[in-house]
Every structure is written in structure tokens, then in C-alpha cells.
Image (cartoon, rainbow, N blue to C red):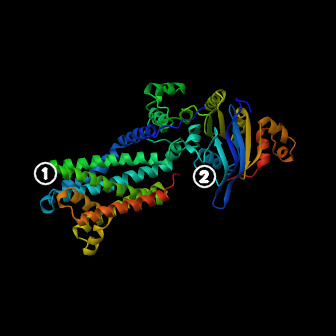
Amino acid sequence: MSNQQRAILEVDQLSVSYGSFQAVQRVSFTVESGEIFGLLGPNGAGKTSTLSAIEGLLRPQGGQINVAGFSILDQPLYAKANMGVQLQSTSFQAELNVAEIIRLFSGIYGRELSPAEVEEKLVEINLQDSATKRFGQLSGGQQQRVSLVISTIHDPQLVLLDEPTTGLDPQSRRQLWDRIEAIKAKGHAVLLTTHSMEEAEAVCDRIAIIDHGRVIAIDTPEALIAAHRNDPDVIAVCRKGKITLEDVFIGLTGRAVRS
Amino acid sequence: MQTKIPQTAAVMSALLRADFTTLWRNRRSLRLVLLVPVVIVISWKGMVKMMGGPYVIAGGITIGLISIGLLGYTNSIARDRDKGVFQRLRVGPVAAWTIMCSRIMVQIATIMAMTIAIFAVGNLVDKIVLSPLGYLTGFFAAVLGGALYLSLGQLIVGLIKNPETVNSTTRLVYFIFIMVGMLGNFGVLGDVVKEMVQWSPYGVVNRMIGTALQPETWNLQATYALLATLGYTAIFGILGIRFFKWN
């Protein structure tokens, strides 16, 4: 593997269970530097459990997770130091303003920022006038920008984004895609989960479709479409004649609505 | 590329700055928490001659400690856990204990401020004067007593997940401690209740602080109260940490 394309995230035979329910079963994949990797799946498929295990928020029952060569189980602080995370529903202390939140997390990641550097970060995300606003007073798009700047404040090798564009208007979504691509351009790896097939096609280099806790397909969006364009289940759900990633996704995971 | 994890001191400094800012922004509710013990000390002015200054000061501090431990600490932990604040912190390269340690240090600072406020109000309004050593040992006893109520708060937030249920439970426990503790200590509820109250978390902290305020009177009963305080703190703390869920 070349220096430019090395595995930043290695998930090997990951298993997560809650009591007798197996949420994730022997899931394996890698995410390489300079790659945007999408994790897709219906509700309850095991995406969040997989992500939580990678983030170190839950302890898996089996398997290995390495971030930049560090095991999240054995060297969690080293693994986390190489990882930036944007959670699905981000919440910060309600009493802190945006500048204070950025300062808090810069300290937590060991990159203590001066007030002037915090100002620079705010200019970067076009929120220089919102430094003294509370996080809850920002719009959805502004909140996502703050969350993203915090998740990349320490210039991590891996950025995890859990449904980053949910609830955003098209302009904010496009802007966020640009920011995600800028992370990739710096040679960092991005793992994102999304329910938007349009997003997966637009920004992901490779995707994994996960269902019932197992990876059922993994490849580039184009290769997945090409590989499944003649599947009867995919053709049956095709709506406009041209097979899309969404058709492949529904064809593989079924039409039934998940809770 | 070499990976450096942030130094614990830097992490603690960032967390403490954020937690103290949060405390400062919540100063209205902080004032309410501190108001009750101050009012108690002022309204018990008439009891100074009868029961002695240390008794009044110890009563005020004990009630203040219950307010801080049960109403302040517990509810803030339950609320932030429910909102996912801890989740966001825990995905960083932060040892879980630093998050909780920072929260506890802020509460201890509140306890210290409350104790000094009670000493000041006791002196200025009730004209209670203690020896310098009495103030010093009373101050440390207050911090020790505060640890008991923080650990009780930890137990409540460990056993109960829903923040609204935590809120109502802490208010109920607070009310029971204040009413049964005060009335029981006075003997209004009978000798059996008085005996029970004296060995309850309310009674042992109250007695330990009361005796620490006049260290020359320290006796075996006060030592038992100190040991009971440490015992309650250890049991509540261990169980509270054991059952605590971060999310």
C-alpha cells in the first residue's frame, strides 16, 4: 500500500450485541487516507452501533478496531487523539457560547487556542458574528459548521460524521459537502453515515451497505450500481428507468419500512 | 506521524474553565441554592443563646450541603447526560474520570463559598464568633460533609436515568432530609426518630461539623460521626459509580 493510500481505520470482525440481540455481526472494512467512505443502512441496521464502537462509546463483544494503528480497545486515548467525531445530535453545555465551546474542545484535544485563534476559526466557518451566541441559538446549518470545526480542530487523520446533513437546506448541504471534500483533499480519511443516497453518490469514494448487522455490499457507488443493475429485486424497485444507488440500496435491503 | 495525547492538566484546565463558566451563568439558581441555608442561619438567630453558635452554623451548613449535593450536582449531571454533553466529551481523548473530577471540583468550590458565606452571615447577623482553629476545622468538616451529599447525588443519578425523575427524586429526598432531619434533631418526632436522625447522613454531618467548629470539644461521638460520614460517602460513591451510565 502506498504512503498516500494507507488504512487509517481498520474494522475487523466487529461484533456488538445488546443482551441476546446481535446488532453488529462480524463487520469488517477499512477506510484509507484521502478517502470518503459511506456507511449506509436502513434504521436499526447496525450503523450507529458500529460507529459507537469505533468512537469508543461502547465495548464490542468481538473484533478489532484500529485508528491510525492504535487499538480503540487497548489504546483508546491514542486512537481518539487521531479521530474527530461529529455525533448525530450534537449537544454542548447550554450555558456556553460558541467561542467558549471551541476553546473547550481545543483544550480537550491539546490544541489550546487563544481568543484570536478562536476568532480565526469562526471566520473560517463564517460565524465571526456569532461568537457570543449560545449553540442553541444557531440555525441547523450553523450548528453543523460549528460541530465540524470542532471535530477537525486537532487536524485528525480520521473524521467520523454521523448523518451530518440531516435537516439541512440544499445550500448548507452543498457547503458541508465542500468542507468534507476539503478534509479529504488534506489526505485525511472520512467515514460518514447517511440516509441520503444522493449524498453517498455525490461525496463517497466507497460505500458499505449494512443490514441486520452485516455488511451486504461494499464498493464504489458506480461499481455497486454496475454489479446490481440486472438484479430482479433492483429492477423491481427502479422508478425512472435508470438504475440509481437508491434502487440498489432498496433492492438489497428490501422495501419494508424499518422502525 | 507521532501521536501525542493531550496532557491531563491541559484537559482539566479546559474542563474546569467550561464548568466554572457554566456555574457562573447559572448564578441565579446558585443564589437560590445558597439562599436557604443563609435564611436558616438568620432565622435561627434566637437559638444562638439556647443551643450555641456552632449548632446554628452547623445546621445552616448541613442544609446548604444537601442543597448543593442533591439539587445542584445531581440535576446538572442528569441533564447533561440526557442531552448528550458527556457523549460529546467522551469521544475526545479524555479519561472519563477527568470529566467527573472537573464537575466535582466545581461543586467543592461551591461548598467552600457557601461555607464562607454562612460563617460571614453567622458573624455579621447572629454575632457568632468562633476561634480561628474552629473556623478552619469547621471548613474542612464542611468539605468532608459535602462529599457525602455529592456521593448521595451520584447514587441517585446512577440508579435513575430519566432527568425529570432524578429532579423529582432529589427534591423529595431534599425535603425529607430537611424536615425529618431538623424536626427529628430537635426531638419533635420522638426519641426513636431522633436516634435514627442522629445516625442518618443528616445527623452525622451535622454533628461532625458542629463539633469541628469547636475543636476543643471533639469527643468519641464526633469521631463516630466522622467515620460514619466517611462510610456513607464510600458506600454511596462506590454504588453511584458502579451503576452510573454515561448515556
Image: B50 above or below A209: below
| Tag 1 residue | B127
Report whether B217 appears left or right of B27.
left
- Judged from the image, the secondary structure of the residue bearing numbered disc 2 is loop
Q: Which amino acid does label 2 sit on?
A: Arg
Q: Can residue B139 be seen in this view?
A: yes
Viewer-nearest residue: B222 or A147: B222
Image: A106 above or below B108: above
Please report, as a chain letter, where disc 2 is located: A
Quadrant in the picture for residue B222? bottom left
**Picture coordinates of residue A107, whole percent (x, y):** 47, 35
**Picture coordinates of residue A69, whole percent (x, y):** 64, 39
| Tag 2 residue | A59
Structural crowding at the residue carrying mark 2, measured as other residues with C-alpha within 10 Å and reported as few (<14), some (14–19) or many (≥20): some
Identify the residue at horizontal 60%, vertical 45% (top origin).
Answer: A72
Q: Which amino acid does label 1 sit on?
A: Lys
Report whether B202 appears left or right of A230.
left
Quadrant in the picture for residue A151? top right
Mark in the foreground, 1 or 2: 2
Quadrant in the picture for residue A37? top right
Q: Are marks 1 and 2 on the same chain?
A: no
Q: In which quarter of the image is the N terminus of chain A?
A: top right
- Judged from the image, the secondary structure of the residue bearing numbered disc 1 is loop
Report whether B84 appears left or right of B196.
right
Q: Distance between the residues labelled 1 and 2?
A: 58 Å
Which residue appears farthest toward the front when viewing the image? B2
Please report, as a chain letter, where disc 1 is located: B
Identify the residue at horizontal 74%, vertical 37% (top origin).
Answer: A206
Image disc number at residue B85: none
Viewer-nearest residue: A199 or B102: B102
